[in-house]
Image: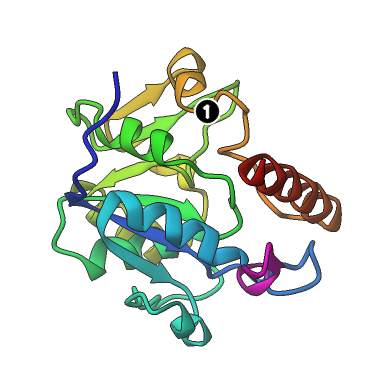
Amino acid sequence: MPFPSKKIDDVAAVVLAGGKGERLGRDKAVVPLGGKPLIEHVTAAAAKVFETVLIAGPARLAFTGYPAAPDETTGVGPLSGILAGLRATDAPWIFTLPCDSPFVSEAFLRGMAALPRNADVIVPRPSVHYEPLHALYSQSCRPHVERMIAAGERKILKLYDLVQVIEVPPEVTDGWDPDGMVFFNVNTQENFEAAQQRFTLLSHKAST
């Protein structure tokens, strides 16, 4: 059954773009893929689904045209981006997305956002591992994250020990991601080359 096309206003999308791209050797957010920066593939998908899209990253990403979620901490990793997103919106929930996941789909975003939100975190678990950067976080997480960062904790999964978590299993996420590409990240040059090949294939299919 198709999801409604109306944009969602009680969840703000937060694109996490604070990483240095050390393994790739360059700023992942602005690496060109298919004629536009990697981050713009993510913001374009998010903007189809959510009324609010925020960028948790450096000021140089203002070219995207989306409001910033100012990151007041450094050296903490994605946990600081989650906190920045929670602080930057009045929405009761945020949906975090990494800036280097160019194949995130509208079906996945709408499917996740449509799940019952009777917990503090809703996170995909398509395998033995969580996907904590493609997850929903309630504002109820904010004080926990603030205390974690103040204590020097950097691991997102430590938050899951403090709050109620709904795990979304592979039999659910597979229905929104038949090609298995939603969680694909461009972390290395090999990943980037694979993304280029995938994008070329998709562009060819769209033109035939």
Asked if residue 31 lies in the magenta stretch, the reply is yes
Residue in the image at 76% along x and 74% along y: 26
Asked if residue 112 lies in the magenta stretch, the reply is no
Residue 13, given in percent of the width and then of the height, sits at 33, 56
Residue in the image at 73% along x and 44% along y: 198
Residue in the image at 36% along x and 75% along y: 66
Residue 44, given in percent of the width and then of the height, sits at 44, 59
Relative to 96, residue 36 above or below: below
Asked whether 141 or 55 is in front, the reply is 55
Asked whether 32 or 154 is in front, the reply is 32
Q: Quadrant of the N terminus?
A: top left
- Residue sticking out furthest to the top: 171
Q: Quadrant of the C terminus?
A: top right
Residue in the image at 42% along x and 34% along y: 108
Relative to 189, residue 157 above or below: above
Residue 148, given in percent of the width and then of the height, sits at 38, 56
**Quadrant of the image occupied by residue 73:** bottom left
Q: How is the image coloured?
A: rainbow
Q: Which residues are magenta?
A: 28-36
Please state if 147 lies on the left or on the right of 185 as rendered: left
- Examine the rendering and report whether any part of residue 153 can be seen: no
**Quadrant of the image occupied by residue 2:** top left
Please state if 189 lies on the left or on the right of 48 as rendered: right
In the picture of the structure, the residue carrying the numbered disc 1 is 177
Asked whether 70 or 52 is in front, the reply is 52
**Quadrant of the image occupied by residue 129:** top right
Q: Identify the amino acid type marked 1.
A: Asp
Residue 131, given in percent of the width and then of the height, sits at 52, 37
